[in-house]
Image (tube, rainbow, N blue to C red):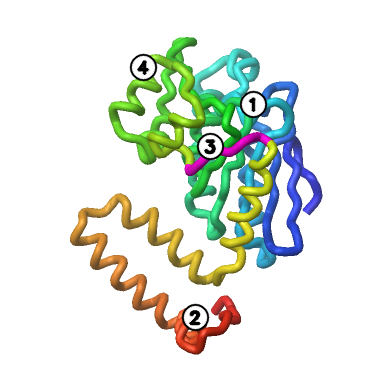
Amino acid sequence: MKNIPNINIKISSNGIGRLTINQPKSYNALSSITLKSLIKAFRFFDNDKKTKVIIIEGSGKGFSAGHDLKEIRSFKNKKKYQELFNLCSKLMLSIVNNKKPVIAKVHGAAFAAGCQLVATCDLAFSTQDAIFATPGVNIGLFCSTPMVAVSRNVGRKKTMKMLLTGDPISAKFAKEIGLINDYFPNSKLEKQVLNIAKRISSKSNVTIKIGKKAFYKQLEMPLNQAYDFTSKIMTENMMTLDAKEGISAFLEKRKPKWSNK
């Protein structure tokens, strides 16, 4: 797939899809065009049989400053605002519903919808000097859509402090509260993220697909219902060829040969 507006994409030989927001002059602001391009890119990766895991990052000085405020200021009616925020929500859902695991690779700042994007990804890793914030309150625009993703990863009190103050938090604190998985020195982030992506890509695609979908679905269920649902999912998983192959390989002390069926 050729590059699409404001986005660069590529797929490595080991099934790792790379997606780069390429708008460094605007700090990779999530304009309407960029949101549409990201949705298109995630749809491509979702349907691409070669892609096993997706890494998203930003070009230039940082990950993403959030929505494009210049674009927002140019809107003249309520319909335009609603279309923008609906697009953003559609992007986040396209990540959660994507069959492939999505890893956020963060450097610099991830603010507002950029922070939402990090929180939405299945995994997130950053440089040790990265910062995260939901600063909408500072400009009279409460980060209501970003709080959906953040509040599903971070405890209520800590989320509310971010939302009510707009203050940025460090990578160290972001890890402590569960917004990101880990942080690394700038020079080591690429290697660490690639190592994790390679480990994921070595697993059975069909197993990852089943597990990711079930993970998000069971989160919203009462405990009894969640166990009933996941028991059925594990039963379905057990009927796949890869589950049978994986168990046989373990017992025979050899590496599994995935058929992804």
Which comes before the other along the chain, label 3 or label 4? 3
Magenta highlight on residue 185: yes
SS at badge 1: loop
C-alpha gap between disc 4 and disc 1: 22 Å
Task: Give the residue type at disc 1.
Answer: Ala
C-alpha gap between disc 3 and disc 4: 19 Å
Viewer-nearest of labels 2 and 4? 2
Residue 90 visible, this orientation: no
x, y percent for residue 45: 65, 56
Task: Give the residue type at disc 2.
Answer: Gly
C-alpha gap between disc 3 and disc 1: 12 Å
Q: Which residue is mark 3?
A: 117
User: What is the crowding at mark 3: few (fewer than 14 residues within 10 Å), some, or many (at least 20)?
Assistant: many
SS at badge 4: helix
Q: Is residue 226 above or below residue 220?
A: below
**Residue situated in front as seen by the camera: 111 or 90:** 111
Are dots 4 and 1 in contact, CB under 8 Å? no
Viewer-nearest of labels 2 and 1? 2
**Residue situated in front as seen by the camera: 48 or 198:** 198
| Residue numbers of the magenta segment | 181-186
Viewer-nearest of labels 2 and 3? 2
**Label placed on residue 29:** 1
x, y percent for residue 145: 43, 30
Are dots 2 and 4 in contact, CB under 8 Å? no
C-alpha gap between disc 2 and disc 3: 33 Å
SS at badge 3: helix
Residue drawn at 51 percent across, 80 percent down? 242
Are dots 3 and 1 in contact, CB under 8 Å? no
SS at badge 2: helix
Magenta highlight on residue 117: no
